[in-house]
Image (tube, helix red, strand yellow):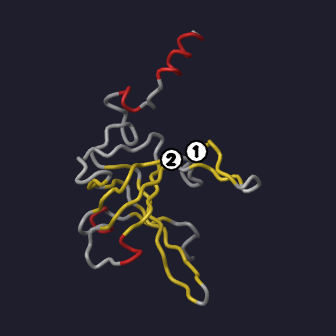
Amino acid sequence: MGIKSKHRFALPFEAAFEKGALLVGEVEPVFTYDSRRRAYTTEQERDELTGQLKWKARLMDLDLDVKGKQSGLDLIFLADVRPVPVTQEITPNVRPIQLEGVTVEVRASVQGDFATMTFAYWATGIKGDTSGSKLPPMDVPASRPVRSDKSAADAKAVA
């Protein structure tokens, strides 16, 4: 029996990123794409295997042996709540992170006459995160989206 398509292999963070990793930018929601309209919707995409919401992030591998396109990668978080990094930024929009629940999916990529093996990286959370993506949130208001003053006033007017 062979390995099924879209199988994800569990991998410890230290094995995937031996020298560590940097989060570049913010963790953002992945929205569904409507191919009929050729546009993204406002509905957040869910993982077809787990049913959890998808969040994307850009990572940089700190291993000096990893060069070119392979040093930067897109990672998908699978969590019901947006994972929040807890480490301090070392420069604007760049911070070191450690991931939890790392899995890797092997894919084939074809460009012209050449085929290469590529990897899709997935994680369930960020080490030290208390937003509720892995455990119940410690600070409930911090895990909720921020309202603008106008929408808060509208909510009070309706109530």
**Residue drawn at 46 percent across, 45 percent down:** 79
Quarter residue 84 falls in: top left
User: Is disc 2 placed on a helix, strand or loop?
Assistant: strand
Question: How crowded is the residue under tag 2: few (<14 C-alpha within 10 Å), some, or many (20+)?
Answer: some
**Residue drawn at 31 percent across, 62 percent down:** 13
Q: What separation in Å lies between label 1 and label 2 (alpha carbons)?
A: 7 Å
User: From the viewer's perspective, is 53 left or right of 71?
Assistant: right
Question: How crowded is the residue under tag 1: few (<14 C-alpha within 10 Å), some, or many (20+)?
Answer: some
User: From the viewer's perspective, is 39 left or right of 118?
Assistant: right
**Residue drawn at 41 percent across, 55 percent down:** 123
> Toward the viewer: 49 or 142?
142
Q: Position of residue 117 (x, y in %)?
A: 49, 80
Specify the amino acid type for callout 1: Gln
In this view, the residue farthest toward the right is: 36
Q: Are marks 1 and 2 in contact (CB under 8 Å)?
A: yes
User: Up-down: is 114 above or below 60?
Assistant: below
- Number of labelled discs? 2
Specify the amino acid type for callout 2: Pro
The label number, if any, that marks residue 29 in the structure image: 2
Sooner in the amino-acid sequence: mark 1 or mark 2? 2
Q: Position of residue 54 (x, y in %)?
A: 51, 50
Q: Which residue is mark 1?
A: 44
In this view, the residue farthest toward the bottom is: 113
Q: Position of residue 126 (x, y in %)?
A: 33, 49
**Residue drawn at 38 percent across, 53 percent down:** 25
User: Is disc 1 placed on a helix, strand or loop?
Assistant: strand
Q: Position of residue 53 (x, y in %)?
A: 52, 46
Q: Quadrant of the C terminus?
A: top right
Q: Quadrant of the N terminus?
A: bottom right
User: Up-down: is 4 above or below 33?
Assistant: below
User: Up-down: is 45 above or below 157?
Assistant: below
